[in-house]
Amino acid sequence: MKNPPLQYGSGFPTLLRKEVKRFYKVGFQTVAAPVLTAILYLMIFGHVLEGREVYGRFSYTSFLIPGLVMMSLLQNAFANTSSSLIQSKVTGNLVFVLLAPLSHFEFYAAYILAAVFRGVVVGLGVFLITAWYSPPALEHPLWILIFAFLGAAILGSLGLIAGIWADKYDQLAAFQNFLIMPATMLSGVFYSIHSLPPAWQVVSQFNPFLYMIDGFRYGFFGVSDISPWNSLTIVLCFFVAVSAIALRMLQTGYKLRC
Amino acid sequence: MSAAISIKKISKNYGALQALDEVSLEIQQGEFFGLLGPNGAGKTTLISILAGLVTASHGHAMIMGADVQSQFRDARRSLGVVPQELVFDPFFTVRETLQFQSGYFGIRNNDTWIDEIMAHLDLTNKADSNMRSLSGGMKRRVLVAQALVHRPPVIILDEPTAGVDVELRQSLWQFISRLNQDGHTIVLTTHYLEEAEALCQRIAMLKQGKIVALDTTANLLSRYGSVKKDGEGKTDLEDVFVNIMSGNAL
């Protein structure tokens, strides 16, 4: 059992590959199912609200597609980190990652990039199928990519925070159902905030998810409720804030190394 | 030459509960060391501190001269831990599990060594089986393989034979003894005291977070063993353990 000395690199690429492979192995549940859900939303809302126009010139179905793509992307980025962590904590196999010489940055980067990857795969799946239903414009692809990446990274970070904080599935479900889901659904996925009563327009402006979806939609139409630069500033600040919290939790070992 | 494990005045409090109380201990390179004690004595807490899974309230610990907190990369690379719980990732096969574990330590192209470990632990024909499909004994072998995948000089086994059949227990000890002969430092916790007596050169006994005995196995047997009532029969580590834990040590 004598062997030559080992050359050590970073464990980050392996942790990233493992997190991607984890959702790939259950692709029906993690990719196909959310794509199907988004199609159902499009069919139902697109049918019921057919004939309406948004921003004065776009059909409601065209307007809805970017919102559904982003909603699916965000929810799946959150699900990837949160479900992976809670499962690993409950079953105890997180110990294998914790025993390894990974820094909190490597841990964070691997989980977040895997979440971004899953979010983008699901978002792309929703886009490809719904675009066939009603092809949307692609006015500013760079804005689409920026908001898709930042949105997925933010929700991945929130999933990481929730996954570390939650001790059982029930707590994670509460975080998802009472925080993430309402914030996503009430962020302009299905409507322009200008269609809301003034009071609700003000309330909506405190929802950071609004800026992710509105900025993302700007990339498709070149029109949005809020300036994309303002949205980008707010989304970037939110990203920095949630990343700082997640990194701090990992660095201190909160509920992981107690 | 630095000690394989150096523990200096380690304490750990969980609220009002003191799990470890200023424990100090040095284990030299190449030793086969036993860490014994009743349930709740603090053995797993001490191991978790060495592995970086738990942060000590006070004190310092080093693995092969590397502080487990400030030099965690070097410390963890030098340490392989077989956890007490039978944990596994249900998404992956045995080979994937070992390849991932190797990759977490930043070791690429480690398949030759992975194949060698699997062969030694009779896991080769289960390499492509999902972890869920393995028996408890097989899962235990994979845990041992995971601890060895980065070829650590120090290996800690936390009750590795709990619930394991005799055949696996014997083959496991043969393998671990060979690793020890090759120069690996082995730290063992077990409730099977005959195993500790047969394998360990030195033993520490923990009781309520404190070390209450620390010596070579031979010295412990001669100092704390009781003479059988009939005047016959050899004293064993179980006698020593009972005497020390009950406070009846001579």
Image: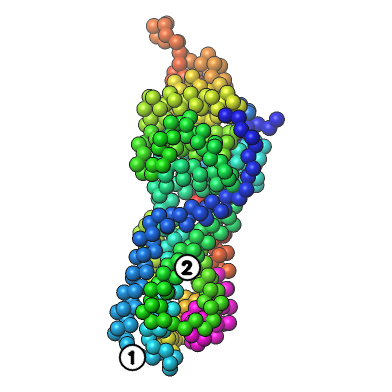
From this viewpoint, which residue is outermost toward the front? Answer: A132
Q: Is residue A39 visible?
A: yes
Q: Residue at x 50, y 29 (%)?
A: B188
The residue at 54%/37% (across/down) is B112
The residue shown at (34%, 74%) is: A39
Image coords of residue B111 (percent x, y): 53, 40
Residue A120 is marked as 2
Q: Residue A73 lies in what quarter of the image?
A: bottom left
Instruction: Please give the residue where the numbered disc 1 appears in the rendered image.
Output: A51
Disc 1 packing (10 Å; few <14; some 14–19; many ≥20) = few
Residue B215 position, x and y percent, is 57, 22
Question: In the figure, A77 relative to B170: above or below?
Answer: below
Query: How far apart are labels 2 and 1 at the CA level?
Result: 30 Å
A219 or A110: nearer the eye?
Answer: A219
**In the image, residue A83 above or below residue B132:** below
Segment colored magenta? A215-239
2 or 1: tag closer to the N-terminus: 1
Residue B247: image location, x then y, percent = 47, 23
